[in-house]
Structures are given as C-alpha cells and as structure tokens.
Image: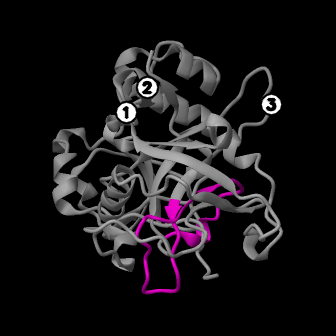
C-alpha cells in the first residue's frame, strides 16, 4: 500500500483571485467595535449581527454519508485549490466515492478515505495536478486581508482572506493544516494526488505538512463522526484486513441534492468588526475564567466561526 500523507496545501490562481478582489480602500483590517464589546469569543459570536456573516455556496459543500447514516459536510475552497477542487466536484458528480470506505485513522493525526484497493477507475476528464498547486502566487494582495500580527513558526505572515485562514511567504499563500482541515492524499512527489483520496486532521495541527500536500477545505459538520472512529492498527493507522473499514454510502455536492436536503451554513466575515472583536479575545482573553491573557494566538487556534444558516 502506498504512503499517502494526510493534508495538503492550496494555491491561488490570478483569475480566481480577481473574482474575489476588493478595492484597495478595503485593504485595512476591520477595527474592533468600540461599544462595550462582549467579553468572550462565544459572546461575540452570539451577539454578532447578520451582516457579519456570509453564506457558503451549495456547490462548495461536499456531503458525505457514512455507515449508520451519519453525515459529514466539508466546505471546499475553490479559490485556494482550484484544480483539486474541480476534480473533487467531478468525482462527487460521478458518485465515485459511493461504496468506498474510510481506510485510515491515525491517532492525533488524520482520518483518510477513498478506494482501499487503489484499483477503482477514475472518471474521465480530471485535471492534472502538481506540487505547484500547493502554494500559488499571492494575487491575494488585491484582496482584503485581515492580518494576524503574531509570530508563526511556519510562515513569515498569517491572516484571513474571504473566511479562510492563510499563511503567506513572499509571493506565495496557502491554507494551513489546522484541525478539521481536509487535504488530498498522494504518493511520493511529484505526484500531487487527484482528489480521490482525502483526509481530515483529527489531532494537533501538523503544520510541517504545509506546502507539501494540497489542502482543499475544512469539515463544517460531523467532525465527531470522524474523530471518534477506532484507530487503525496497521502502519500509519491504516486498517488491517481484520479491521472494519467504515463504508461510505454516498458523497454528493449539496447543490446536487434536493433543496430540502441541502445543508446550509454561514461563516463569519473575516473583515467585519465582529471578527476583529473575536480575534482580539482569542489572543487576549481576560474575564471571569481567564486570569492571564495569552498575548497572542496562532493561526489554527483562531478558527473562523461557522454556523448553520438561521
């Protein structure tokens, strides 16, 4: 069985970035509210107005149903990993994952799924991928970046763009390997994976994988169904022939489901005053419970708030 690590990184094409571009006047991050902001991050989320939230597109939501009818929803990041996400959409529309399984659960690392035999034919027309897809040119300079002004051991700069955490180095930007983020399994470089083999981080963020694998999205519902699975006893946490691989019943794009079955989620606008308050409190919380503010926060410990659409 080939080695297929757990998470990968993303790239931003100029054309896609231009579609998300904001005017230069929007380059400055939003300032925290000055009217008695709530004292905890959860209170900020609860008090945030509807204007502080943006809806996730149905075509960006991947709905996976596993054994027992349990549902896992992944938000895809097409602006960050355009070729891999295009392949994932094609695989979902071909119902390719139906009848495959979760094959690997490595403690404090990843849950991985796909075709355990590695012999199932892929649908035609998938885009070629390469390591160049892991971190794309920083066309994001034309986007509204909310900076995270704290040192990061894996990138010179970090921040948030269009609801996603990003790490940056010179003219390159990528999605980090945070808890719940989803990447593309691959073999040894220069193979970059097609998107047929996916995994989600279920442990401490393995940021050393940044720019070594393609990150394509994040789990927004059903993490408990993945993180609570029995650990595999084989090498790297793969299930052995004697262990139970968890069947995948179906994987669909939300946009291809009947309206009544489509999950709907929103993420906090990372340029909003509410997010500025939230970020401030994640870094410097001082309330009834916290006596000593941390004085900083890392990129993966300030997850962008997500909620079901009211």
Q: Residue, x 58% and y 54% (percent of image)?
A: 178
Residue 115 appears in view: yes
Q: CA distance from mark 3 to mark 2?
A: 45 Å
Examine the rendered structure and indicate whether residue 205 appears above or below residue 266: below
Q: What number is the disc on residue 291?
A: 3
Quadrant location, the C terminus:
top left
Going from N to C along the chain, the mark reached first, 3 or 1, is 1
The answer to whether residue 204 is magenta is yes
How busy is the neighbourhood of tag 3: few (under 14 within 10 Å), some, or many (20 plus)? few
Residue 80 placed where, x, y %?
Answer: 35, 57
- Side (left or right) of 114 relative to 292: left
Q: Report how far apart the C-alphas of labels 3 and 1 lie in the structure.
A: 48 Å
Q: Position of residue 94 (x, y in %)?
A: 35, 54
- The dot on residue 257 is 1
Q: Nearer the viewer, residue 268 or 251?
A: 251
What residue lies at 64% left-to-right and 81% top-to-bottom?
A: 1
Q: Would you name the residue on which mark 2 appears?
A: 261
Please give the name of the residue rendered at 34% of the width and 77% of the height, measured from the top-left corner: 132
256 with respect to 40 (left or right): left
Q: Secondary structure at mark 2?
A: helix
SS assignment at label 1: loop
- Asked if the stretch drawn in magenta spans residue 153, the answer is no
Tag 3 and tag 1, C-beta contact below 8 Å: no
Say whether residue 57 is visible.
no
Q: Are marks 1 and 2 in contact (CB under 8 Å)?
A: yes
**In the image, residue 126 lies at what x, y percent?**
29, 68
Q: Taking 240 as reference, is 296 above or below it?
A: above
Left or right position of 41 against 197: right
Q: Which residues are magenta?
A: 183-210
Element under disc 3: loop
Mark nearer the N terminus (3 vs 2): 2
């Amino acid at each position: 069985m080939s080695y297929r690590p757990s998470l990968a990184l993303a790239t931003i094409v100029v054309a896609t970035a231009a579609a998300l571009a904001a005017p230069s006047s929007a380059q400055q991050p939003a300032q925290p509210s000055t009217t008695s902001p709530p004292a905890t991050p959860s209170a900020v989320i609860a008090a945030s107005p509807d204007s502080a939230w943006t809806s996730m597109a149905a075509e960006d939501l991947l709905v996976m149903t596993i054994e027992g009818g349990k549902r896992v929803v992944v938000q895809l990041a097409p602006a960050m990993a355009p070729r891999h996400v295009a392949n994932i959409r094609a695989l979902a529309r071909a119902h390719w994952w139906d009848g495959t399984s979760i094959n690997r659960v490595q403690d404090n690392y990843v849950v991985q799924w796909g075709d355990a035999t590695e012999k199932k034919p892929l649908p035609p027309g998938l885009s070629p991928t390469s390591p160049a897809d892991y971190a794309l040119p920083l066309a994001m300079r034309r986007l509204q970046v909310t900076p995270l002004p704290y040192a990061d051991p894996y990138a010179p700069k970090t921040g948030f763009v269009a609801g996603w955490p990003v790490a940056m180095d010179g003219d390159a930007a990528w999605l980090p390997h945070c808890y719940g983020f989803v990447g593309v399994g691959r073999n040894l470089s220069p193979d970059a994976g097609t998107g047929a083999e996916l995994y989600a981080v279920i442990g401490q963020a393995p940021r050393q994988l940044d720019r070594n694998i393609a990150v394509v999205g994040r789990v927004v519902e059903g993490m408990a169904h993945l993180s609570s699975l029995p650990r595999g006893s084989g090498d790297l946490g793969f299930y052995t022939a004697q262990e139970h691989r968890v069947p995948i019943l179906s994987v669909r794009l939300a946009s291809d489901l009947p309206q009544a079955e489509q999950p709907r989620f929103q993420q906090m606008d990372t340029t909003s005053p509410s997010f500025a308050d939230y970020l401030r409190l994640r870094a410097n919380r001082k309330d009834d419970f916290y006596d000593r503010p941390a004085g900083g926060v890392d990129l993966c410990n300030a997850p962008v708030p997500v909620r079901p659409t009211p």
